[in-house]
Amino acid sequence: MSNKIPSLLEQHLGLPEEASLTILTNTLGASSNWLVLRFLYSILQSGRGADAGVSEKEASPGVVFLSFMRDLAFWREGASRLGLDLDSLSRAGKFSFVDGLTGLLSGGQGSESTADRGRVLKSGKLDDMRRGIEAAITDVRSGPKVLIVDQLDELLAIFGEEDVTGLALEGMLLSLRERVHATVLTFSVDDPLLRSQGTSLERSHAALVLAQAHAADVILSLRMLDTGVAKDVSGVVRVTERDRAEASAEYLYHVGADGNAKVFERGT
């Protein structure tokens, strides 16, 4: 595999197994953006992963990428640093982007699709969102389809419990997971969001994240160093597999200003 994928994480960043759920968690100061980009690169550029449960005829997977935190321009720039052309992949039917950030506060209806922004969700109603995402899934014409949802928990903060509940989001996720080969979700897991639970938003956020974590097959958790900031270390990545406790591991990582990422064991 390309040296753009850290070797210690290589087995976790290929095409996931069929019907699997992978969770990427982040905290303030330990963003998961670099990990999401390498998931995209590994799946779209490098073909199928080991033991992914697909035939050789399905060796060219596609990605449906929904982000509630960043627009397509951000991800396009990050992917280009890895040599990944998202526009070309989109035209080839291997990639579809859904913008869950810029359109939801406009008060519009349904969704719209543009070449420079991808599909833009415009309605805060979950049924409308689901239909927009399903349309994006249909846009991908390549092999097994992987759904990546970046910061689904942001919906709770944007709309509040009166419009969007954690249980309703879980129901939408289950419906979408039935339409794709595998699913990858990212969440914020800062302590104030999970432990204090003093408000209904904090309780809903904690319930959503914990429910998905319990259902996950693999969790990659990012956090800052317990001892603070270091010049050559950005943070810690912990890998947990539900059915392989012996495979759990913890590494250090460093993301440079140019976007290059290194993952290494402590003491090396």
Image (tube, rainbow, N blue to C red):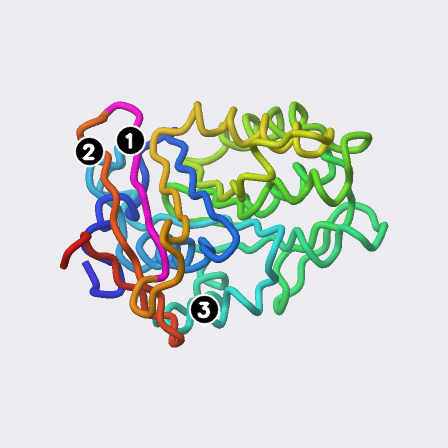
Secondary structure mainly formed by the magenta segment: strand
Per the image, label 3 sits on a secondary structure element best described as: helix
Q: Is residue 50 left or right of residue 109?
A: left
Residue beneath disc 2: 247
Per the rendering, the mark at residue 108 is none
Please state the horizontal and vertical placement of residue 226, each as a whole percent of the image: 37, 49
Chain-order first, disc 1 or disc 2 = 1
Residue beneath disc 1: 241
Residue ID at (60%, 38%): 193
Residue type, mark 1 in image: Glu
User: Extreme right residue here?
Assistant: 107
Chain-order first, disc 1 or disc 3 = 3
User: Extreme bottom residue here?
Assistant: 258
Chain-order first, disc 2 or disc 3 = 3
Please state the horizontal and vertical placement of residue 194, each as a whole percent of the image: 56, 33
Residue type, mark 2 in image: Ala
User: What span is colored magenta in the figure?
Assistant: 234-243
In which quarter of the view is residue 45 placed? bottom left
Bin the neighbour count of mark 3 within 10 Å (Cα to Cα): few under 14, some 14-19, many 20 and up.
some
Question: CB atoms at circles 1 and 2 under 8 Å apart?
Answer: yes
Residue ID at (26%, 37%): 52
Residue ID at (44%, 50%): 63
Residue beneath disc 3: 78
